Amino acid sequence: MNPIATDNVLIDGKRIAHGVYGEGEPIVLLHGTPSSSLIWRNVVPQLVGAGYRVHLFDLLGYGHSERPRDPSVDTSISAQVPVLEALMDHWGLETAHIVAHDFGGGIAQRLGVFHPRRLQSLTLIDVVSYDSYPSPRTRQQMAAGLERLIKVPDDEHRAHFREWLLTAVHDPQRFESSTLETYLDFISGPIGQASLFQHQIRHYDPKHTLEVAARLPELGRIPVKLIWGADDAWQSVDYAYRLHADIPGSDLSVLEECGHFSPEDRPEEIARLVIEFLKR
């Protein structure tokens, strides 16, 4: 499947794949794990059609961006914040509407707390928050040792993560017939498998969101929209209600027949809700 992050820029010496579409008020889209900017492919055209300029990128260590060989390079939620800020500077954006999914939501929460001037508004979609991650299943995997998991045979690795990814959507058949193999390709093979554990799973640490949890009410200074899949098996909808209660003035929409990868399950509805929110 063709990427939508087709340009490249060096940020602190690391190559970041990114893309810009349309004209108008700026929106920055943040993806999560284990995905890439490709998750927004069916949302972007509708945002552009509504008159917005859409900016997106693959996080450092993800998708088509650089997968640093040096294990000391930090690709955690906290470390991605300065990457985002540098990209915004590259795009000429002092501020923008931020729309974030999954781990991208952790990045957005930290940006909103520590650098609130950079946000015009914030939309959080099925995001990590508080101590909502990693899941018990992932904790078990991490306890088994990441070095051992890196060396699991490719076919065994792909089979395991195929089954795991299918739990992220409400309609597995639709996902299998569209982008599932691309998701798997990014996290499998001689580069992808090791990168998944080094750049993503190694940083499944709730400290990054717990550090800002007590300050989430400060996000109420800007407009905040929460969107959640009612059938999210990765990030329980209970966390949506908790965020809604903690962020004054926030607005919450829960989508029926929708899983964790809501931009895969319900891209048209996601785009509609974002557009309606921004126009208000």
Image: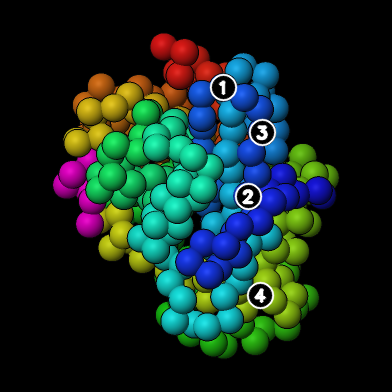
Magenta highlight: main SS: helix
Determine which of the numbered discs, if any, sits on residue 21 in the image.
3
* Residue 90 lies in the magenta stretch: no
Q: Distance from label 2 to label 3 (Cα)?
A: 10 Å
Frontmost residue, 99 versus 239: 99
Q: Secondary structure at mark 1?
A: loop
Residue 193 - label: 4
Q: Secondary structure at mark 2?
A: strand
Q: Position of residue 123 (x, y in %)?
A: 43, 32
Residue 258 appears anywhere in the view: yes
Q: Nearer the viewer, residue 27 or 152?
A: 27
Q: Residues within 10 Å of mark 1 (few under 14, many from 20)?
A: few
Q: Which mark is residue 18?
A: 2
Name the residue nearer the viewer: 159 or 98.
98
Mark 4 or 3, nearer chain start: 3
Residue drawn at x 35%, y 53% as measured from the top left? 132
**Closer to the N terminus: mark 2 or mark 1?**
2
Where's residue 68, x and y in %?
Answer: 57, 75
Q: Secondary structure at mark 3?
A: strand
Q: Is 183 on the left or on the right of 50, as rendered?
A: right
Magenta residues, as a range?
A: 211-216
Q: Is residue 66 above or below residue 20?
A: below
Instruction: Using the image, tell me which numbered label, if any, was put on residue 24.
Output: 1
Label 2: how many Cα within 10 Å (few below 14, some 14–19, many 20+): many
**What residue is shown at x 61% (from left), y 57% (from top)?**
9
Question: Residues under labels 4 and 3: Cα distance?
Answer: 31 Å
Image x and y of residue 152, in percent: 67, 84
Extreme residue toward the left, this view: 214
Give the structural element (helix, strand or loop) at label 4. helix
Q: Is residue 214 magenta?
A: yes
